Amino acid sequence: MRVQKKHLFLSALLLVIFASVLGVCYGSIESLCAPGRYENTAIFIMLFSASMFLSILPLIFLPDSFSSTWFRFTKYYLPITAIIIIITPGVDTSILGVDKEFMTWALSGLYLFLSLIIIFWKHLRAKKEKPL
């Protein structure tokens, strides 16, 4: 399981770097770096990979029992979130203003918050069960 956590950590880090290049690349290579062309994709990839990166960081230093609960949560959360973001309208003219970018920000923030709660909860539970 240790190797899997390290691979996931490195994958999330590489996705953050890749999305950063896609989101801010305004060079002279028009086919890859046309201004604004990949901005929506870059925001989605960067926010979720950054959230995953920040939630995997403490898991690397904790026992494998902590990561199994987090992997189960991630396995169900990410596909549901991707579907929600796909069906969200690109531009919303209603009073709420819920568009793809807002949903991406909100759901990736919720993912990070819930991931850290799961890790903290498992840590507290392990401390309680551990005899002195």
Image: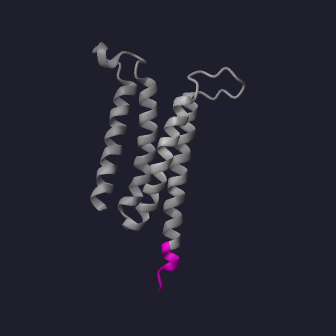
Provide residue 74's location: percent of width, then percent of height.
46, 50
Provide residue 27's location: percent of width, then percent of height.
31, 17
Kindly identify the residue that appears in the image at 45 percent across and 56 percent down: 72
Q: In which quarter of the image is the N terminus?
A: bottom left
Is any atom of residue 104 visible in this view? Answer: no
Tag count:
0
In this view, the residue farthest toward the bottom is 132
Relative height, residue 124 to residue 11 (above, below): below
| Left-right relation of 3 to 96 | left
Relative height, residue 126 to residue 3 (above, below): below
Q: Is residue 10 magenta?
A: no
- Identify the image's colour scheme: rainbow, by chain, secondary structure or one colour: one colour
Kindly identify the residue that appears in the image at 63 percent across and 22 percent down: 92
Kindly identify the residue that appears in the image at 53 percent across and 33 percent down: 85
Provide residue 96's location: percent of width, then percent of height.
69, 29
What is the quadrant of residue 94 in the picture?
top right
What is the quadrant of residue 117 in the picture?
bottom right
Provide residue 32's location: percent of width, then percent of height.
30, 19
| Left-right relation of 91 to 19 | right
| Left-right relation of 31 to 82 | left
Relative height, residue 46 to residue 12 (above, below): above
In this view, the residue farthest toward the right is 95
| Magenta residue span | 126-132
Q: Nearer the viewer, residue 21 or 94?
A: 94
Kindly identify the residue that appears in the image at 55 percent across and 41 percent down: 107
Is any atom of residue 103 visible in this view? Answer: yes
Q: Does the magenta stretch include residue 129?
A: yes
| Left-right relation of 124 to 97 | left
